[in-house]
Image (cartoon, rainbow, N blue to C red):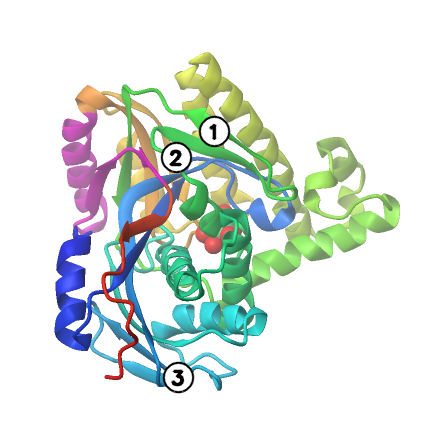
Amino acid sequence: MTNGSAGSLAEEFNREFHLRPAIFRAPGRVNLIGEHTDYNDGFVLPSAIGFYTRVAVSPRSDGKLVLRSVDFPDAFEFDIRNLPGAKLGAWCDYVLGVAVELAKQDPTMPGASLLVHGEIPVGAGLSSSAALEVATALAFLSLTGREMPLQSVARLCQKAENEFVGAHVGIMDPFVSCMGRKGNAVLLDCRSLEFELVPIPEQVKLVISNTMVKHELSGGEYNQRRAQCEEGVHLLSKRYPGIRALRDVSVEQLEAQKASLPAVVYRRCLHVVLENRRVKEAARSFRSGDLPSVGRLMKDSHASLRDLYEVSCVELDAMVEAAEGLPGYIGGRMTGGGFGGCTVNLVESPQAPSFAEAIAARYRNATGIAPDIHICSAADGANQEQEINSLSPSKQ
Ligand code: GLA
């Protein structure tokens, strides 16, 4: 991950558009536990991390929406009153999806120039897309002065990704990108959006290990898992009419209906039902200072994602195994959607640097791939970094 700054993005914006922009930033996230539970109305325990996507913005009077990125060569220009109805298959889709949603709510939204810079590796399961959507939403909202609670911003970003990008993701990523808090994980009820902060002890680091295998959420596997869960709910609700989502199903209910479910649907449901329990238990264990229990729950979560939900891969399993037995290691698992991306490891702070070196060497030996390892702490959610200096719309 590269570290950018608001200052250098403002200079770049100034070179491109001859104006000083306002700058908004939104962080990536790492999910500590609660995987594939968010779209089942369940519970998750992610943290925002200190790697950001920044969006520099200034309004335009010519009704154009001009999109550039520091990271990608392709630039885009649209008419704000006539935005595309379907995705283009490029980085701009995340920005467009948000613009389309906001323009529906506010037909007076002005044109704008945007310059984007992301520090979060794309396809690593650290939520680069949600960070771009959240920073974009704040940038557009600033143009009209419209106030929107951050939780509604998160919902809007999820809708943009579901409907425009076509990835049927849950609320976790945009929510924690908006609401993350330094030093804390966020225990989120994905049905009610009620949340509690769960302090992560200071002597613990989040070591994020990138397998360097890219995953793609708009690819079919993620949406297929979601459909299998929905099938489970449909079948179970014939027997238990009160059930709206897997969140409402107990292990006992699921076991009683095992014979009436296709085997694969049963496995998916069992993962989700048990994972929801693990999230709540992990939050309790963090609070009581029982870190070994958190570690065990993370290990069980990984095994369940590998064997029941089948979203791990050889490299993720190798990275989890590479951590076993290293000094300072508390627990770890794959994080995010799966099929590649990163593992998250809880590691005692003093041992974090040597842990990072050792896990990298072990993983390289096992797979032949050199991983990226990042020693992180929980960070704050999205905010504005730089006020706009010139409010006069640009014509460039
Ligand atoms: C991706 C999605 C999230 C969530 C995770 C799996 O990160 O964006 O909504 O479903 O996968 O937990």
Q: Is residue 27 magenta?
A: no
Asked if ligand 1 lies within 8 A of label 1, the reply is no
Q: Upstream in the sequence, badge 1 or badge 2?
A: 2
Q: Nearer the viewer, residue 379 or 8?
A: 8
Where is mark 3, residue-wise?
63
Label 3: how many Cα within 10 Å (few below 14, some 14–19, many 20+): some
Q: CA distance from mark 3 to mark 2?
A: 37 Å
The answer to whether marks 3 and 1 mark residues whose Cβ atoms lie closer than 8 Å is no
- Mark sitting earlier along the chain (3/1): 3
Q: Nearer the observer, disc 3 or disc 2? A: 3
Residue at x 41%, y 65% (from the top left corner)? 140
The response on whether ligand 1 sits within 8 Å of label 2 is no
Dot 1 surroundings within 10 Å: few (below 14), some, or many (20 or more)? Answer: some
Q: Are marks 1 and 2 in contact (CB under 8 Å)?
A: yes
Q: Nearer the viewer, residue 249 or 106?
A: 106
Label number found at residue 181: 2
In the rendered image, residue 316, in percent from the top left (x then y), is placed at 35, 46
Q: Quadrant of residue 13?
A: bottom left
Determine the residue positioned at 24% across, 66% down: 390
Left or right, 19 with respect to 335, comes to: left
* Label 2 Cα neighbours within 10 Å, binned few <14 / some 14-19 / many ≥20: many
Mark linked to residue 121: none
Using the numbered discs, state the Cα–Cα distance from disc 3 to disc 1 in whole angstroms: 42 Å
Q: Position of residue 62 (x, y in %)?
A: 35, 85
Which residue is under mark 1? 197
Residue that appears at 58% across and 69% down = 105
The C terminus appears in which quarter of the rendering?
A: bottom left
* Residue segment shown in magenta: 352-380
